[in-house]
Image (spheres, rainbow, N blue to C red):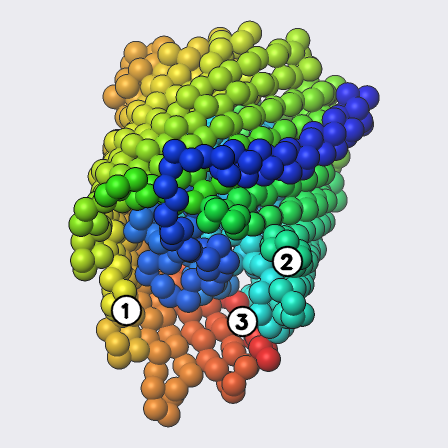
């Protein structure tokens, strides 16, 4: 641990104290200001229960949510495309990562780098979302390099996808959209114990135990432990998550929810990624295809260790004037240590095999990463009536500090054979090429006015300004300061049958952690136009939504190290659809469709203008049906899904194509007796070998093969 990293432990705690202190100051200031605001006539606040907006979805096609507005509204009142997944969607196929749970969601490309159980590789509308687009309880879980937080989906009540730029509310973030993980929270009595196994010889136990203690107090203890073998060679290990929570209300009526999330993992790496195009997508004359289950790392040296913890405090208080103040403060720390071999083409770093055994060039790699974060998001919202127009006002302040201390070292001299893989041995690594810290601070002030008038008209205006400071203290280092203004304007109309068309224009920015010496001097920025509709009538047996969009992303970094520039631009155009229909006879059908046309519009290499970036499939389609039996087979539900991923490109010049893939999944649940349920799931039934995508011709990833799981859950 470097002295700089040790020093920043106190910096983090000091900032956290300042953030927590600012909560009280902000509350008092706003309350005092509001009490003296005589120029407005305060109307009746449209009460929307915050707990309902973060609680179970229970199949509601138009649930309340806080994703996309930061104040609780029903889904159709968010002027952007949004998907809300509840526990049923997460558990259906036994998902052990959020990425797996999102396989049937429009606009989202999952498992971008294949079957990686350690990280949720995600893209939304063609743009990478896993670094600046992941949020936990509406507060950003920033990731950079290997400094990330892994969230086990069993600890989540919901997964919500907000598609399109969201900087007007969330500050610097992914232009394609964000994924908001919503934690399970204490409320009423819950008793759940689950045991599960899979055909890789892995097993797990899950528990969810909580209750109300009366007097507006409740607790919840949620956890999961998984161990055993994985689906590729020698990959095994143990991981565990524990998420306790407690809620209480003070004598003054302030509701406080405390959430913690602890996660530990001691595992090894999968071997189905970072493989060459020739041997995965295209067969070779020497040996055909690389075995998707092969692992070319060293079983004795390969290691993955993660230790992380976060604690959050969520406060909500309804003031005497009818407005509500709410906020979250979170501290987090994550230690990630990894060492493994990964291939980079064939011997001599060739795209194609150079011998009959398919000798691979290996890069031995090791890193030691420590992340510390502190953040807060404070919001003040309520309703003001001004004549014929009702204003749902929101004012907020959020701040985030991200500290990353890391060392990275590698070598380039080892090899392994595709035909006869062996343990390469312990590599001799070169001196670290990274040893130091990266620090980013972001503070944003934002405002939202959602206006309602006439016969169902809804107008939304957002304005936000951010101040960002980014520092690195290695390889010459840099200290850069950015400030950006973002906004969103939208118009919607909610008809009597709850059909709600909308049109939205929004801007975004995404601060980059890169040195001006490398040609990076400002954040990415751009804009989006979106038009769509949402339709989910109350008590109806269907829901559907559709959207068409265009995102222009500017200041994209182009070129190769060390001669980078920001002359790049990418345009993503597309159409998305989601729908669900309940036939009221036990049969339910839901589907999703995504069509994306992404093009490079500016680049330092003019030959690339008009090409499509890699890892963006042209289309994604899914259909999922389930049938709940009645009569003698009551308690049995069978479901099957089909998911299709279209072609994508494997190189920047678009000369190499990754073919499309169609996969079939199946699940069955059976209520053995009241409170005892068995779940059986099979994904990729045909055990189809396919490639999820290629970042370059050297970096292609196999998708998951057939996986079978069986679990038994007791609830009482």
Q: Is residue 197 left or right of residue 298?
A: left
Gap in angstroms between the C-alphas marked 1 and 3? 34 Å
Task: Choose the circle earlier in sequence order: 2 or 3.
Answer: 2
Crowd rating for badge 2 (residues with CA inside 10 Å; few <14, some 14–19, many 20+): some
Is residue 515 or residue 315 the one in the foreground?
315
Gap in angstroms between the C-alphas marked 2 and 1? 33 Å
Marks 1 and 3 close (CB-CB < 8 Å): no
The residue wearing badge 2 is: 249
Q: Is residue 685 left or right of residue 443?
A: left
Marks 2 and 3 close (CB-CB < 8 Å): no
Counting from the top left corner in percent of width and height, residue 332 is at 68, 40
* Quadrant assignment, res 409: top right
The residue wearing badge 1 is: 539
SS state under label 2? strand
Question: Which of the labelled discs sits on residue 710, or is there none?
Answer: 3
Counting from the top left corner in percent of width and height, residue 568 is at 36, 16
Counting from the top left corner in percent of width and height, residue 244 is at 68, 58
Q: Is residue 520 above or below residue 86?
A: above
Gap in angstroms between the C-alphas marked 2 and 3? 40 Å
Crowd rating for badge 1 (residues with CA inside 10 Å; few <14, some 14–19, many 20+): few
């Amino acid at each position: 641990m470097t002295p700089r990293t040790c020093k920043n432990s106190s910096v983090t705690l000091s900032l956290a104290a300042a953030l927590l202190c600012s909560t009280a100051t902000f509350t008092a200031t706003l309350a005092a200001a509001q009490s003296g605001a005589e120029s407005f006539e305060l109307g009746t606040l449209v009460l929307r229960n915050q707990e309902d907006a973060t609680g179970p979805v229970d199949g509601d096609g138009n649930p309340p949510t806080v994703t996309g507005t930061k104040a609780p509204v029903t889904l159709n009142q968010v002027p952007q495309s949004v998907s809300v997944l509840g526990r049923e969607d997460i558990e259906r196929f036994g998902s052990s990562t959020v990425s797996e749970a999102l396989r049937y969601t429009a606009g989202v490309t999952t498992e971008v780098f294949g079957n990686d159980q350690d990280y949720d590789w995600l893209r939304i509308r063609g743009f990478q979302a896993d670094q600046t687009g992941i949020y936990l309880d509406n507060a950003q879980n920033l990731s950079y390099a290997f400094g990330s937080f892994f969230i086990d989906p069993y600890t989540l009540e919901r997964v919500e996808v907000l598609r399109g730029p969201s900087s007007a509310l969330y500050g610097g973030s992914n232009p394609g959209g964000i994924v908001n993980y919503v934690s399970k929270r204490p409320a009423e009595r819950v008793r759940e114990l689950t045991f599960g196994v899979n055909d890789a010889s892995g097993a797990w136990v899950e528990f969810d135990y909580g209750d109300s203690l009366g007097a507006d107090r409740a607790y919840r203890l949620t956890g999961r432990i998984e161990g055993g073998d994985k689906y590729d060679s020698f990959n095994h290990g143990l991981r565990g998550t524990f998420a306790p929570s407690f809620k209480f209300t003070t004598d003054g009526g302030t509701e406080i929810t405390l959430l913690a999330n602890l996660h530990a993992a001691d595992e090894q790496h999968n071997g189905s990624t970072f493989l060459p195009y020739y041997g995965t997508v295209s067969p070779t004359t020497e040996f055909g295809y690389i075995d998707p289950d092969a692992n070319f790392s060293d079983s004795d040296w390969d290691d993955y260790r993660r230790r992380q913890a976060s604690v959050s405090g969520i406060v909500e208080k309804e003031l005497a004037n009818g407005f509500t103040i709410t906020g979250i403060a979170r501290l987090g720390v994550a230690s990630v240590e990894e060492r493994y071999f990964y291939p980079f083409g064939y011997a001599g770093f060739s795209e194609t095999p150079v011998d009959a055994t398919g000798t691979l060039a290996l890069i031995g790699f090791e890193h030691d990463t420590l992340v510390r974060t502190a953040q807060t998001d404070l919001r003040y919202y309520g309703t003001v009536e001004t004549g014929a127009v009702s204003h749902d006002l929101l004012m907020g302040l959020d701040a985030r500090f991200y500290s990353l201390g890391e060392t990275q070292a590698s070598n380039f001299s080892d090899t392994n054979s595709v035909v006869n893989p062996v343990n390469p041995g312990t590599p001799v690594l070169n001196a670290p090429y990274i040893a130091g810290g990266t620090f980013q601070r972001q503070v944003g002030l934002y405002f939202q006015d959602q206006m309602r008038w006439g016969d169902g008209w809804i107008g939304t205006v957002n304005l936000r300004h951010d101040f960002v400071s980014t520092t690195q203290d290695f390889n010459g280092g840099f200290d850069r300061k950015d400030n950006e203004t973002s906004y969103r304007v939208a118009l919607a109309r909610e008809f009597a049958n709850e059909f709600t068309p909308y049109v939205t224009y929004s801007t975004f920015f995404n601060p980059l952690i890169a040195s001006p010496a490398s040609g990076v001097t400002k954040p990415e920025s751009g804009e989006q136009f979106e038009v769509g509709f949402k339709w989910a009538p109350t008590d109806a047996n269907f829901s559907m939504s559709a959207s068409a969009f265009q995102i222009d992303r500017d200041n994209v970094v182009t070129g190769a190290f060390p001669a980078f520039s920001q002359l790049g631009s990418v345009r993503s155009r597309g159409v998305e659809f989601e729908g669900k229909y309940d036939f009221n006879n036990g049969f339910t059908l839901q589907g999703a469709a995504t069509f994306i046309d992404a093009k490079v519009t500016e680049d330092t290499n003019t030959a690339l203008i008009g090409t499509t970036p890699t890892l963006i499939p042209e289309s994604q389609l899914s259909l999922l049906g389930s049938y709940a039996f009645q009569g003698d087979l009551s308690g049995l539900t069978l479901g099957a899904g089909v998911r299709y991923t279209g072609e994508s490109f494997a190189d920047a010049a678009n000369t190499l194509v990754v073919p499309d893939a169609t996969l079939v999944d199946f699940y069955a649940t059976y209520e053995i007796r009241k409170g005892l349920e068995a779940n059986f799931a099979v994904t990729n039934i045909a055990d189809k070998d396919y490639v999820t995508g290629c970042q370059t011709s050297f970096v292609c990833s196999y998708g998951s093969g057939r996986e079978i799981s069986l679990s038994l859950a007791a609830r009482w």
